[in-house]
Image: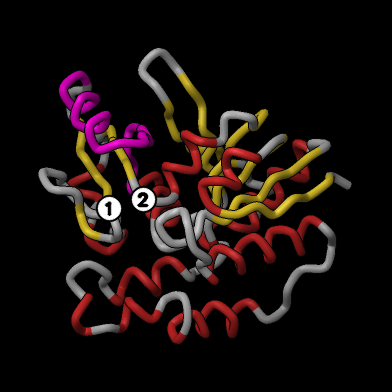
Amino acid sequence: MSKINILHYIEGAKQAEGLTVIIDVFRAFSLECYLHDMGVKEIRPVGTIEEAFRLKETLDNSLLIGERRGKMCEGFDYGNSPSSVSRERVEGKTIIHTTSAGTQGIVNATGASEIITGSLVNARAVAEYIKIKNPEVVSLVCMGNNGVTQALEDELCAEYIKSILEGNELQDMKARTEELQFTGGKHFFDEAQKEVFPTADFWMCIQYNKFPFIIRIEKDGIGYVARRVGNETFI
């Protein structure tokens, strides 16, 4: 059995070691799963808005997707909203992605031996991948709100992945995910915030175990790239 550490926020990402799962349920890494399912060419996670714009100048057929404090970055093509994108717009495209929490975890996890992303929509696939790799140390990093405060959905995702790894899978996930509409996801039901946080995003992000693939972070001559890694044994 691997040693499993649950860490938190950007500071936790900096402390992560071993096979590291950067968790962001609402909405970064749920969105990336949906984007891969829609047939994007690749996803390029970056830390800053400035880097995103620089990268777009060098990459043909690319789109800018991202947010700061939930709101779409000015000059971007899309915010961090899975319900706002369509296959017709993103299929075959390179996505340049920057967020307040999720992508910050990636760029700060410099001590990790391997980085994958995590969300409820592919939580079981993440756990099965970890089982296959069987690392000595696993770091589950809950990125939280803006990378600095607790997000209950990320805590639940980490708890769920850990429970599968330990052979004691949580049995009340349907109730617990739906309960998030009254806690960590209540902003998706606030009429005053519906343009930034569409209600549809909430329901898309809590569809646990929807996708049978993980997203592994690699690095090439351009920078980070978030690649889909599938295995029919994951789910």
Q: Position of residue 16 (x, y in %)?
A: 65, 40
| 107 or 60, nearer to the observer | 107
What's the residue type where badge 1 is placed? Arg
Would residue 211 be seen by someone viewing this image from the given angle? Answer: no
Q: Does the magenta portion include 110?
A: no
Question: Mark 1 and mark 2: span between their CA atoms?
Answer: 5 Å
What's the residue type where badge 2 is placed? Ser
What colouring does the structure picture have?
secondary structure
Image marks 1 and 2: residues in contact by CB distance under 8 Å: yes
Task: Say which quarter of the image contains residue 21.
Answer: top right
Which residue corresponds to the image point at 61% horizontal and 69% vertical from the top-left?
156
> In the rendered view, would you say 110 is above or below 180?
above
| 161 or 149, nearer to the observer | 149
Residue that label 2 marks: 100
Q: Position of residue 124 (x, y in %)?
A: 65, 57
Residue that label 1 marks: 68
| 204 or 230, nearer to the observer | 204
- Single out the residue that lies furthest toward the top: 221
Left or right of 6 on screen, residue 79: left
Q: Does the magenta portion include 57?
A: yes
Picture disc at residue 57:
none
Q: Secondary structure at mark 2?
A: loop
Total numbered circles: 2
Would residue 98 be seen by someone viewing this image from the given angle? Answer: yes
Q: Which residues are magenta?
A: 37-58
Q: Earlier in the sequence, mark 1 or mark 2?
A: 1
Q: Secondary structure at mark 1?
A: strand
